[in-house]
Image (cartoon, coloured by chain):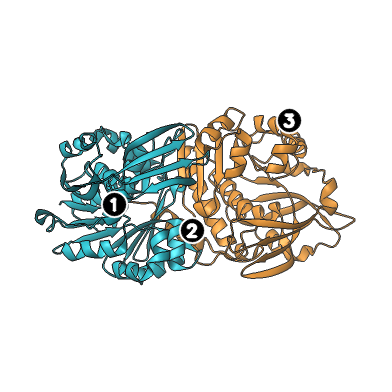
Chain colours: A cyan, B orange
Amino acid sequence: MSVVVVGSVALDTVETPFGKVDDAIGGSATYFSAAASYFTHVNLVAVVGEDFPIDEIQFLQSRGVNLDGLVVKPGKTFRWGGKYEFDLNQRETLFTHLNVFENFDPELPEHYRNSSYLFLANIHPELQLKVLDQMSQPKLVVMDTMNFWIERTPAALAEVLKRIDILIVNDSEVRQLAHTPNLFVAAKRIQTMGPKVIVIKKGEHGALMVHDSQYFWAPAFPLEQLRDPTGAGDTFAGGFVGYLAKVDDTSSVHLRKAVLYGSTLASFCVEHFSIEGLKNLSPQQIERRYQQFVTMVTCD
Amino acid sequence: MSVVVVGSVALDTVETPFGKVDDAIGGSATYFSAAASYFTHVNLVAVVGEDFPIDEIQFLQSRGVNLDGLVVKPGKTFRWGGKYEFDLNQRETLFTHLNVFENFDPELPEHYRNSSYLFLANIHPELQLKVLDQMSQPKLVVMDTMNFWIERTPAALAEVLKRIDILIVNDSEVRQLAHTPNLFVAAKRIQTMGPKVIVIKKGEHGALMVHDSQYFWAPAFPLEQLRDPTGAGDTFAGGFVGYLAKVDDTSSVHLRKAVLYGSTLASFCVEHFSIEGLKNLSPQQIERRYQQFVTMVTCD
């Protein structure tokens, strides 16, 4: 089954203790697509400026990512600059230049609208609603959001939450959205707002999924060198949604496997700057690391 | 197989957002013994003052804990006071009155010295060495330590590390001991100092064990109400060592199961203040929760 992703394609300037890149390919839709492309066909919706080096994402097309929904507008591409200190869990945003992304108004190409799987990356909830209105009848809708929208646009966010199946956010966002510090209580509270499945990304501590009344814990990969955490969350989402779309089955077992595939792809992402770690993975590499995730939690 | 534990028996005054207890039973050896007693016979070594309400730990004897090594000295019992704020991962020590514990000089009763399993709770490394010298030939030595000894007595600590098999500490202590922020690199570095197995307690994020070149991740139990985290680490150690002593097998499979049993006992501990949660568990309760731990990480 194919997946539609609506999000950003951006140019990132990132500094970590292990190096620095300027205007490197980034953006939620880019990371998501690169990861999901290892599992299924992806239809991307995003906007870039005339300065965007389209050539650098041509490899996505060769991996089955449809770029018909990538609009080039007059002006500059969305740029983000950030710096990670020694503790790679903490980052400082140095600048955010929305540029053409400021007036992003996602318009889904006709041939995208029948896709069964939809990922709403972290954009304004009003835009997420507009996207939902354009889809025929997706089988599964997964979304991300952030503290900015939780604080600024709670009403619109509440509307989106009612219409989605799975929320993927980080632990602090879960606590903030549910107004409680206990993750388990928070997840249950969010289940009453709409999504029946909450996937909580916890960085170096792995991920936790609450589905119905079940809990599933996934480890993080024991990386001795983690170079750049940028895009890890969207890459996780790409592996997660991509796997579900591939098997076209959202039963518990597959939701759990999807979390491990998401974690697997995210672990490859953070080993390199930008999207480098997601460019040339083999199915064998992915399967081997997936099995390592399984082994890390197995007792017998 | 029986286990010897050398540590503290104390009176704790603890405040959390869920309540407060004054002079409640506490201490590393107490928590450890209570947890380990569900698996095997325990020989406790500690010191208390004349004011200690011995009656309140008589239940340990009925659970097979030998208190012959509990010495009553003139003076007052070790008292600790602490407060946990809303975030139960952070605690503030309000007071530490060592009292008779200040001159603790562990003397193992003769009939303890042939025990095959030894747990050195968090005490001065010089005392840990003295205990090691008194044991005939333990099959497995497990130890805990803390930032205080890592900073103040590194040479003595290094000597103890050379003589132990398993180190159980929390994540910040691992980083501090190995002088590196990456947990995996840190654990490998500590393996070169002596212990081949490093068990890292991560509070609400579960536990991570590094054994040889393998990693094992254990979840934390999804408790909606965690009342008092005091003693969770020693309780974990009690379940961990107690299980290993019971099966008398330290192969990988059993080390992994031991981590889950440690996590299981710790989850019961933190549901109540002091040692209340460890007093009357049934084997069925323990087994049921252990299975829930397994289910939380299982994909099929």
Q: Residue at x 49, y 32 (%)?
A: B212
Q: CA distance from mark 1 to mark 2?
A: 42 Å
Q: CA distance from mark 3 to mark 1?
A: 58 Å
Q: Position of residue B87 (x, y in %)?
A: 58, 60
Q: Residue at x 50, y 44 (%)?
A: B208
Q: Position of residue A165 (x, y in %)?
A: 27, 63
**Residue A17 in sight from this viewpoint:** yes
Badge 3 sits on which subunit? B
Mark 3: give few (<14), some (14-19) or many (20+) Cα within 10 Å.
Answer: some
Residue placed under numbered mark 3 in the picture: B155
Q: Earlier in the sequence, mark 2 or mark 3?
A: 3
The quarter of the picture where residue A297 lies is top left
In the picture, measured across the screen, residue B246 lies left or right of residue A275, that is right
Q: Residue at x 52, y 60 (%)?
A: B283
Given the image, on which type of amino acid does mark 1 rest? Phe
Badge 2 sits on which subunit? B
In the rendered structure, are the residues bearing label 2 and label 3 in contact, judged by CB atoms less than 8 Å apart?
Answer: no
Residue placed under numbered mark 1 in the picture: A101
Given the image, on which type of amino acid does mark 3 rest? Ala
Closer to the observer: label 1 or label 2?
A: 1
Q: Secondary structure at mark 3?
A: helix
- Front one among B264 and B57: B264
Q: Secondary structure at mark 2?
A: loop
In the picture, measured across the screen, residue A121 lies left or right of residue B214, that is left
Q: Is residue B97 above or below residue A11?
A: below
Closer to the observer: label 2 or label 3?
A: 3
